[in-house]
Amino acid sequence: MPEFLDIKHLDAGYGRSQVLFGLNMAIPSRGGVAVLGRNGAGKSTLMKVIVGELPIWKGGVHFAGRDIDSRRTEERVRAGIGYVPQEHSVFARLSVRDNLAVGLLSNREASAMDRVMEMFPKLGERLDQPAGTLSGGERKMLAIGRAMLGNPKLLLLDEPTEGVWIGVIEEITERLSELAREIAVIIVEQHLDLAMRVAGHAYVLDRGRIALSGPSRELRNDPRLLTYLAP
């Protein structure tokens, strides 16, 4: 049976600069998968390719049994891929309520908003507040909540705790761990302990290639891991 997200021999990059080289990844329909590596290893590029913001040079991406190589980003989102980018993940001038309303455009379930409020109660206290005035952690919660309103089957998270206070990191980690028991979650994260808590499996990229992969518990104790993560 094919994997839920199946990436084969993937090459991609920007302009004439190749960033990813022959990546093969298999993501199940439920559970967390971490993508680790130094800055510039190709992690964000991989996420952008999966969601359709960057074209594939060679190889292919299959999602839920279908070839999505030629699909536009909005088509992939409608098919069930949610994406929380590293930067510019909220509309700063819009209120929290209006940011969430954007996520509701593709979801008519009445309970969807209630679920997000249960996940992140702080958002319920700030519905009329401009998103740009939220703390870094609250903006990340808002971005994740808005992505969840699209009812994704696969959630892509690029550095969800960057610039976030340690106390809020713990709350986000708990919510993501809960989500990973229900849907597929791919997380790019510099906070190693967080990534390993959310993800049962991990891939380590080095210069656009997979250097290590395997169960998170095994990789956590692999002496080669820090070599590939060190600046």
Image (spheres, grey):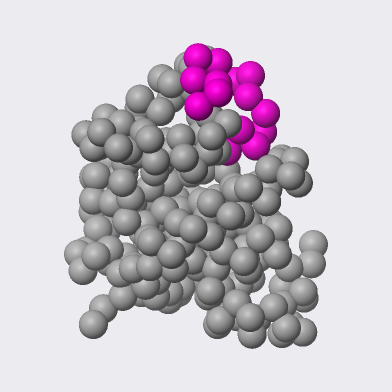
Image coords of residue 87 (percent x, y)? 58, 37
Nearest the eye: 174 or 72: 174
Q: Is residue 225 magenta?
A: no
| Magenta region | 124-140
Rendered residue at 68%/48% (across/down)? 169
Q: Is any atom of residue 7 visible in this view? A: no
Rendered residue at 25%/33% (across/down)? 110
- Left or right: residue 18 versus residue 132 is left
Nearest the eye: 44 or 173: 173
For residue 149, what is the image quadrant? top left
For residue 206, what is the image quadrant? bottom right
Rendered residue at 55%/21% (across/down)? 126
Image coords of residue 210 (percent x, y)? 55, 76
Image coords of residue 207 (percent x, y)? 62, 68
- Left or right: residue 37 versus residue 129 is right
Image coords of residue 183 (percent x, y)? 37, 60
- Left or right: residue 215 versus residue 15 is right
Vertical position of residue 163 compared to residue 30: above or below: above
Vertical position of residue 20 compared to residue 117: above or below: below
Q: Is residue 138 magenta?
A: yes
Viewport quadrant of the C terminus: bottom right
Vertical position of residue 39 compared to residue 87: above or below: below
Rendered residue at 43%/21% (across/down)? 97
Viewport quadrant of the N terminus: bottom left
